[in-house]
Amino acid sequence: MSDDFWLVQQQKENQSENLLMADDETQLAIDIRNTVSEKNTTLSHSQKVLLGKRIKQTISTYKRKKIIFRISTAAVILLLIGIFTILTMNREPEIVAFARYNQSVSLTGNTKLILSGKEEIQVNSDESKIAYAKNGKEIQVDSNRVQQVVEGEGVYNTVIVPYGKRTKITLSDSSSVWLNSGSKLVYPARFARDKREVYLEGEAIFEVSHNKEHPFHVITHDVEVKVLGTVFDLSAYNDDKITSTILESGLVEMKYNTNSILSTSKVRMVPGMMAVYNPEEKDVKQTKVNVKLYTSWKDGYIACEKQSLGEIVKKISRYYNVSIQLNDQSLKNEMFTGNLDLRNSAVQVLAIIAEFINIKVEKTNNQIQINRL
């Protein structure tokens, strides 16, 4: 026997053993290879037709498996992306977790400065000032100086402003924050190198020092506002149905949740605009406003311009933490224009309105009754 014969025989034996482990596609490929490798082999017409059908069937099966594999791979990738997105969206920033952990606070009595969630400093004045040095260790509280230990990053302080009081805070980056009554601000004693982030409940006016490389973020229970350097008012009281932002100058970007479980959206604001986020509709609407009507409280008064008595009463009630009852519901639509001094009592403020609107103001215990004359 020739060497060629032995080689062919050995090759056939090896192929026979491999066929036991091969699938249909591999077997067909081997059959085709064996056929074309035998020089003197000729196929009948029926064999050619059968071989052609097997080739087409194998190609079709291969394409179908390839498509299924691609679809399955894409589905797995989308699933992983979805899981990652949900986990990322649901993961709270460290400052938010800190604020929630230290949530039980009283909005009555004196203004409170809480250092690192532990040491509490009482501030007696109605209009207090708190200023931080750049190192975050030295704090000026009105006329008193306070020292605190700041080891690295992640040291959060909290200011709680009760009803009937206001506070101005100068942060370690020289940004200024005016906190309105019934508000709470959580912030780092010294900002991290890569971010500037604070958490707000209530209302505050921010005058942010410009730093293009480190935007300033204000987080609330509903929205997050990104700032480069600007002046704006943000109102996010827990008992309000909406969250609003009024931009006085500069540029801000509001990020909020939409109706999609995997989606957030952003809107940019220009000066003179008010953006209102409705958590039920998960949408933001912008309107042009007179900014002074929303920021005048910083200077100790409420500016009113054809404002309804119903809206004014709500502001006064919140600021002084008193119950005000309009016994005639039609009074809600009465309009008033003028300035109301917040240094006066709630009754005195309402007495000014009574000079222009035919109403009678009476106080019983902690409730104020308003009747039409």
Image (spheres, rainbow, N blue to C red):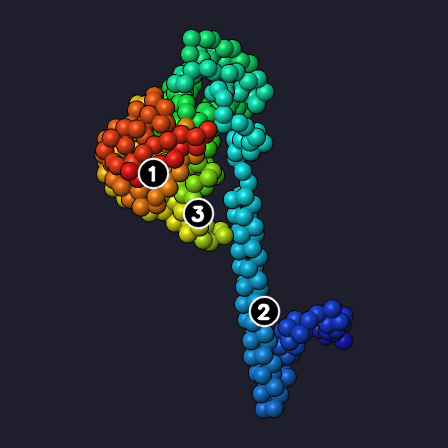
Pinpoint residue 100: horizontal percent, then vertical percent.
Answer: 55, 33
Which mark's residue is nearer the viewer, 2 or 3?
3
Determine the secondary structure under disc 1: strand
Residue 320, picture quadrant: top left
Instruction: Name the residue carrying label 3.
Output: 279
User: Quarter of the image containing the C terminus?
Assistant: top left
Using the numbered discs, state the Cα–Cα distance from disc 1 to disc 2 in whole angstroms: 80 Å
* Number of marks drawn: 3
Label 3 amino acid? Pro
User: Quarter of the image containing the N terminus?
Assistant: bottom right
Nearer the N terminus, badge 2 or badge 3? 2
330 to 143, vertically: above or below: below
Nearer the N terminus, badge 3 or badge 1? 3
- Tell me whether circle 3 and circle 1 mark residues in contact (CB < 8 Å): no
- Is 20 left or right of 128, judged from the image as shown? right
Mark 2 crowdedness (10 Å alpha carbons): few <14, some 14-19, many ≥20: few
Front residue of this view, candidates 221 and 224? 221
Label 2 amino acid? Lys
Residue farthest bottom in this picture: 45
Determine the secondary structure under disc 2: helix
Residue 323, picture quadrant: top left
Instruction: Name the residue carrying label 1.
Output: 371
Front residue of this view, candidates 195 and 62? 195
Q: Which mark is residue 65?
A: 2
Q: In the image, what residue occupies the spot 45% across and 13% down?
A: 141
Q: In the image, what residue occupies the spot 30% across and 24% down?
A: 341
